[in-house]
Image: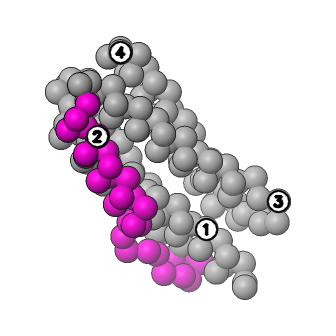
């Protein structure tokens, strides 16, 4: 497999996760009442929308096609989040725990690509992935802060 296909496949995996995260944030934003947390989630929706466009551009730079939608795994996770929030006595805390879990999984995926010694990334790709990973780290820290506020 040539480099452009290999990196595009990895970027498409991130793109799919980005679609999943954006959809998940939209779902949970509707379920919280706290204005600060609602704004935080809205910011994450916009952030993931922007991430998606950046990843699509990077993929097309390698003359490959970007993915069009989310994953079955993401659909299942959102369904589970929807179900648990209907039976939980503290929806906001539970939602923030799930946000944290999703962000940790995203960080792992970004780190796997960035630390893959078999794949030397183009500078534009590496810079994009580092920027997005750092934004995800910040979101994770903010989710933890909000969770401590509501617990």
Say if residue 54 shows up in the picture. no
Alpha carbon separation for disc pair 4 and 1: 37 Å
- Residue 69 pos. (x, y %): 36, 70
What residue range appears in magenta? Answer: 60-88
Circle 4 residues within 10 Å: few <14, some 14–19, many ≥20: few
Which of pointers 4 and 1 indicates the residue nearer the eye? Answer: 4
Residue 117 position in % (x across, y down): 82, 59
Q: How many marks?
A: 4
Query: On residue 10, which mark appears?
Result: 1
Of marks 1 and 2, which one's residue comes earlier in the chain? 1
Label 2, label 4: how many angstroms apart (C-alpha)? 17 Å
Badge 2 element: helix
In the rendered structure, which disc, 4 or 3, sits on the residue that comes first in sequence? 3
Q: What residue does disc 2 label? A: 84
Q: Residue at x 55, y 36 (%)?
A: 137
Question: Considering only order in the chain, which callout, 1 or 3, is on the residue closer to the N terminus?
Answer: 1
Closer to viewer: mark 2 or mark 4? 2
Distance between mark 1 and mark 2 Cα atoms:
31 Å
Residue drawn at x 44%, y 74% is 67
Residue assigned mark 3: 117
Label disc, if present, on residue 151 of the rendered structure: 4
Disc 1 versus disc 2: nearer the observer? 2
Question: Quadrant location of the C terminus?
Answer: top left
Question: Is disc 1 in contact with disc 2, using a CB cutoff of under 8 Å?
Answer: no
**In which quadrant of the rendered view does residue 92 lie?**
top left
Q: Is residue 40 magenta?
A: no
**42 or 80: nearer the eye?**
80
């Amino acid at each position: 497999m040539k480099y452009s296909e290999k990196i595009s496949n990895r970027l498409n995996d991130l793109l799919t996760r980005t679609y999943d995260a954006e959809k998940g944030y939209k779902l949970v934003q509707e379920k919280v009442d706290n204005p600060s947390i609602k704004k935080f989630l809205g910011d994450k929706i916009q952030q993931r929308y922007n991430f998606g466009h950046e990843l699509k551009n990077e993929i097309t730079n390698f003359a490959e096609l970007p993915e069009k939608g989310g994953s079955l795994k993401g659909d299942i996770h959102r369904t589970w989040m929807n179900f648990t929030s209907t039976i939980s006595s503290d929806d906001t805390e539970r939602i923030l725990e799930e946000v944290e879990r999703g962000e940790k999984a995203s960080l792992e995926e970004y780190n796997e690509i960035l630390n893959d010694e078999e794949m030397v990334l183009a500078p534009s790709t590496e810079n994009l992935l580092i920027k997005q990973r750092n934004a995800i780290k910040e979101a994770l820290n903010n989710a933890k802060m909000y969770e401590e506020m509501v617990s």
